[in-house]
Image (cartoon, rainbow, N blue to C red):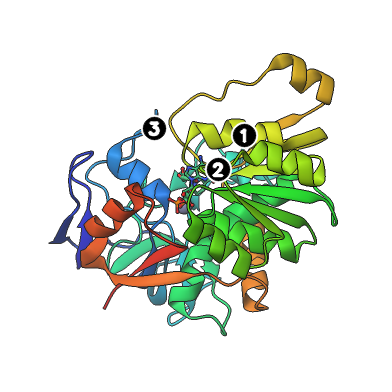
């Protein structure tokens, strides 16, 4: 099968023929139709994070397609089902986190396109119990980003504990941010969108942001404090430290900063302000299988629409180059076949 492979960090991905994965007990084989390009895939290809991915690696954790084969012991999925293979590729099912509905914290989890091969290929195998079925009315291309960008931001908004009517700030209107703001609107929040590029903010307005701030042209913290007196929750899905600092400062008393973006950096937080203002700082990592089902349902109901650009798998190196420069509006989805 054809796949895009990371052989070495910071080198171009190689498009090459590799063997189709062989199924083990409980696994299914998915013929991939589309796979979104998450900024995480770029971090993986660059070896940015303290925990490194396997090498060689087939990235991709928004891989969606049709089930071509089911292995021994598979009950929940059948041939021809439409499914997606998310970042949470598998978890142990037995630890305190798995047993308490917090499977994304499982220390024994595997991650698609990181610790195991993912969706940048014609085929991807996965444990049947951890894939999600795709609603009938959504195309492969449009649903693909829900499998990471969608579920991750939906979950982050839940983690924020903001309530309908509250103001929420989304820092970074990229692949994650452009769906984050739609989930936020659908969940009843007022939304301010912050980015450093006008075209992203144009998209944010089209998608329903109540107001937008360009962090290159003005001070988002001041704009937010002046206009709404601070937000109940700030979700940072940006890729630079500056955005996290500003997101923290945008939060009002008793509010929260939810840290989602993953630049390999530190977040200096003033202890005095955090204590006196009772601000919570929380990390949020993707979402559980249940979160994913819910996130898919919002998309099926038309409440969240992904802004996508399709490109053939072979274009992945160009797509990564554009991502580094911030030249992607919404999500690029790689297509196969
Ligand atoms: P992306 O490249 O599509 O979007 C990043 C956006 O941040 C861009 O629109 C860019 O213009 C904007 N940005 C950069 N600097 C900014 C600043 N100072 N202020 C405001 N905006 C700024 O990336 P993505 O695919 O949306 O991923 C974003 C980050 O989230 C990555 O680090 C990725 O690894 C991480 N991520 C985390 C999780 C998780 O579960 N926690 C899941 C998926 C992705
Ligand atoms: Zn992702
Ligand atoms: Zn576990």
Task: State the residue lying farthest toward the front.
Answer: 217
Q: How dense is the environment of label 3, judged by Cα within 10 Å: few (below 14), some, or many (20 and up)?
A: some
Can you say whether 241 is above or below 6 in the image?
above
Residue that badge 2 annotates: 215
The reply to whether the C-beta atoms of the residues labelled 1 and 2 are less than 8 Å apart is yes
Q: Which callout, 1 or 2, points to the residue nearer the camera?
A: 2
Left or right of residue 79, residue 129 in this image: right
Q: Name the residue located 69 percent from the left edge and 57 percent from the top edge.
A: 211
Where on the picture, by quarter, is residue 280? top right
Q: Which callout, 1 or 3, points to the residue nearer the camera?
A: 1
Q: Name the residue located 41 percent from the left edge and 52 percent from the top edge.
A: 112
Spot occupied by residue 149 in the image (x, y as percentages of width and height): 53, 57
- Of the numbered discs 1 and 2, the one sitting upstream in the chain is 2
User: Which labelled disc corresponds to residue 49?
Assistant: 3
Spot occupied by residue 95 in the image (x, y as percentages of width and height): 62, 37
- Of the numbered discs 2 and 3, the one sitting upstream in the chain is 3
Where on the picture, by quarter, is residue 123? bottom left
Q: How dense is the environment of label 2, judged by Cα within 10 Å: few (below 14), some, or many (20 and up)?
A: many
Q: CA distance from mark 1 to mark 2?
A: 9 Å
Asked if the beta carbon under badge 2 is closer than 8 A to the nearest atom of ligand 1, the reply is yes
Quadrant of the image for the N terminus? bottom left
**SS at circle 2:** loop
């Amino acid at each position: 099968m054809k796949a895009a492979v990371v052989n070495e960090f910071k080198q171009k991905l190689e498009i090459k023929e590799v063997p189709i994965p062989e199924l083990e007990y409980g696994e299914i084989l998915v013929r991939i139709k589309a796979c979104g390009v998450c900024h995480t895939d770029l971090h993986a290809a660059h070896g940015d994070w303290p925990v490194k991915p396997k090498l060689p690696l087939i990235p991709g954790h928004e891989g969606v397609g049709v089930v071509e084969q089911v292995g021994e012991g598979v009950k929940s999925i059948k041939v021809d089902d439409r499914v997606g293979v998310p970042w949470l590729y598998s978890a142990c099912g037995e630890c305190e986190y798995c047993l308490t509905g917090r499977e994304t914290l499982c220390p024994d989890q595997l991650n698609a396109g990181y610790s195991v091969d993912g969706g940048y290929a014609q085929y991807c195998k996965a444990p049947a119990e951890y894939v999600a079925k795709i609603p009938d009315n959504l195309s492969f291309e449009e649903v693909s980003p829900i499998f990471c960008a969608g579920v991750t931001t939906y979950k982050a908004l839940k983690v924020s504990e903001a309530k309908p009517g509250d103001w929420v700030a989304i820092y970074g209107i990229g692949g994650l941010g452009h769906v984050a703001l739609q989930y936020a609107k659908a969940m009843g929040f007022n939304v301010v969108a912050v980015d450093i590029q006008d075209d992203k903010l144009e998209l944010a307005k089209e998608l329903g942001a109540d107001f937008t701030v360009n962090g290159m042209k003005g001070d988002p913290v001041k704009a937010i404090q002046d206009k709404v007196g601070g937000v109940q929750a700030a979700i940072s899905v940006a890729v630079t430290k500056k955005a996290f600092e500003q997101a923290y400062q945008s939060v009002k008393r008793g509010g929260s900063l939810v840290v989602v973006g993953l630049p390999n950096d530190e977040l200096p937080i003033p202890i005095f302000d955090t204590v006196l203002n009772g601000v919570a700082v929380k990390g949020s990592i993707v979402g559980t299988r249940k979160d994913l089902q819910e996130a898919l349902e919002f998309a099926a109901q038309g409440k969240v629409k992904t802004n996508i650009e399709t490109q053939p798998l072979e274009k992945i190196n160009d797509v990564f180059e554009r991502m580094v420069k911030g030249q992607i509006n919404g999500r690029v989805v790689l297509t196969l076949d």
